[in-house]
Image: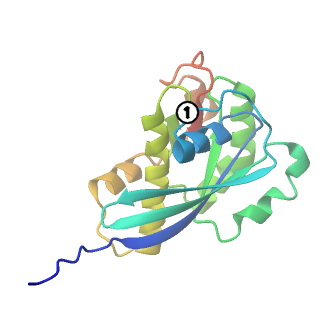
Amino acid sequence: MKERRSIQPAVVRCKLVLVGDVQCGKTAMLQVLAKDSYPETYVPTVFENYTACLELEDHRVELSLWDTSGSPYYDNVRPLCYSDSDAVLLCFDISRPETIDSALKKGSAVAKQLGAEAYLECSAFTSEKSVHSVFRTASLACLNKLNPKTKPSPTRRLSKRLLHLPSKSELITSTFKKEKARSCSIM
């Protein structure tokens, strides 16, 4: 009698770093992804690490998630998190224009220079599915970076179509309404 062996998916490790202003939703997104719960109270972050696993195509993606402080006091230390990162998610709260200004000033040029893969909007408060979509897209971008010869899947082609770094006016008039508090956009 032959023993059946199941084929284990290839394991890929990706380091994702979340950056953005104070209280723009970085920690909430990570808690929704890693712990399946929305934080009821705000606790300022200095630096925090989370882990999560996703099954994508024929890969198991183990995410090392780095939550950074949005406080300007940590501006000199934050870049230390970027080393060996596979993706940086630039976060802002669409309902707070000052966080958009900050993200555009600090991140737009960097995103263009690095060839940002996608622009996505999500809400950790109202849509767990949208949060998972952000991390799925980031994971697929990491897989594509690690295996550039891999034939793009429909999801990868979709993420390529999302490559558009919007202006501030486009962000403010976004389909994601400003009154939807606790929402977060990712670049």
Give me the residue at 43% from left, 67% from top.
143
Residue found at the far top of this picture: 179
29 lies left or right of 3: right
Q: Position of residue 21 (x, y in %)?
A: 75, 39
Give me the residue at 49% from left, 40% from top.
131
58 in relation to 131, above or below:
below
Give me the residue at 42% from left, 67% from top.
144
- Residue receiving disc 1: 124
Q: Quadrant of residue 26?
A: top right
Relative to the observer, which residue lies in front, 184 or 27?
27
Q: Position of residue 5 (x, y in %)?
A: 22, 77
Q: Position of residue 66 (x, y in %)?
A: 67, 56
Residue found at the far front of this picture: 1
Q: Tell me the element at label 1.
A: loop
63 lies left or right of 74: left
Give me the residue at 50% from left, 64% from top.
62
- The N terminus is located in which quarter? bottom left
60 in relation to 154, above or below:
below
Q: Position of residue 120 (x, y in %)?
A: 49, 40
